[in-house]
Image: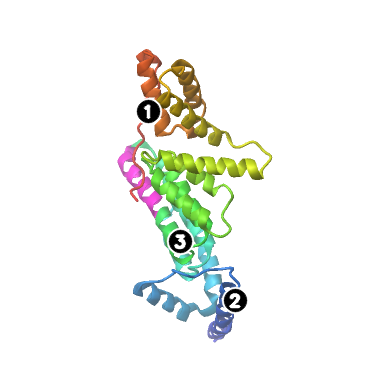
Amino acid sequence: MKPVIILAALLAFGALRLPLEHGLAAARVNAGLRDDTGATMNMREQVSQASLVALLGGLRSMAAAIWDLWACTAWENTNYAQVERDYQFCQRLQPRTFYYYDRGQWMMAYNAAHFYELQNSERGALNALLRSAYTDKGLVMLRTGQRFLPKEPRLHEQEAALYRDKIRPRQPEKEAAAWGRAADSPGAPAYARRMQAYALAHVPGQEREAEAMLRSVFNDWTKHRTSRPPPTLTNLLEIYDLCRQVEENPAADAQSIYSRLRAIYDRSPPSRIPRLWAMLRQLESRLDIPITERTPEPPTEPAVGTL
């Protein structure tokens, strides 16, 4: 009898809380604190959401918090399949809560992928596949979150970080696009446009667009800040200036320009854009730099992620 009373009380509490949650959500939308535009669901998701609402009523947030704790327990046991299921359930319970997408993608693309990366070599091929698969799972969670929270800049920022740090071979055009969406979102971090420019500078064929964006970022920085611009920003602009000197002036001091470009290459990995690499190769050939002293080929990295 006692369990029946407790269950009835919980259902009654949920029934009372559900209209309040909906009212608060509507108030946040009207106040401009949340934008649900574009957050459409397909039929399967609608049925799933309706089932969860009917089952849990206003207890969805509480249930999601409990599943979050269970996911942490599964993580401690390195049961990443269970971690994935738990966070997918949390995301269905609370599809417009940033935290569960953030937490889920971190567990997948960072914790799980790193775990399989460090596993022993006896299962090397399988672990490489699992590392790649969990990196993709993290990205899928972020994109699911973007459907429900299209103007949440952190979701786009985290996608860009995955393309920059985890997915290989690197796809700078997708990274730049993600940074661009982050920069265009309300409440975007001040560095998002700068990071977009950095990524765009690594896209072959986009040199002119990248340089224009970098100069815009630099001008904005010097206009509104008293601190010195970041070294990567000044290095990239110097690379464009030095390359232009070589291309426009055949009498330019090739040795001096080469020494400066090589110093930037050796000191600043983020500045190793295709334009820099191509100019170093051109100048090394012109100056007859010995093969053993030329810029080394970039190391080949194993493929990680397919999305």
Residue 252 rendering spot, x and y as whole percentages = 45, 19
Q: Is residue 118 visible?
A: no
Q: Which residue is mark 1?
A: 278
The answer to which of 210 and 26 lies nearer the viewer is 210
Nearer the camera: disc 2 or disc 1? 1
Magenta stretch secondary structure, dominant: helix
Task: Check residue 27 in the rendering and tell me which mark sits there, or answer none.
Answer: 2
Where is 61 relative to 98, above or below? Answer: below
The residue lying toward the viewer, choosing from 4 and 253, is 253
Dot placed on the residue nearer the N-terminal end, 2 or 1: 2
Circle 3: residue type: Gln
Give the magenta-colored segment's residue range.
Answer: 122-137
Report the disc number at residue 146: 3
Nearest to the eye among marks 3 and 1: give it. Answer: 1
The secondary structure type at the circle numbered 2 is helix
Q: Calculate the distance from the C-alpha at mark 2 to the C-alpha at mark 1.
A: 55 Å
Q: Rate crowding at label 2 as few (under 14), some (14 to 19) or many (20 or more) other CA atoms within 10 Å.
A: few
**Kind of residue indicated by mark 2:** Ala
Q: Quadrant of residue 128?
A: top left
User: What kind of element bears circle 3?
Assistant: helix
The quadrant holding residue 168 is top left
Give the residue at the far right of this rendering.
226
Q: Is residue 7 magenta?
A: no
| Residue 280 visible in the snapshot | yes
Q: Nearer the viewer, residue 249 or 211?
A: 249
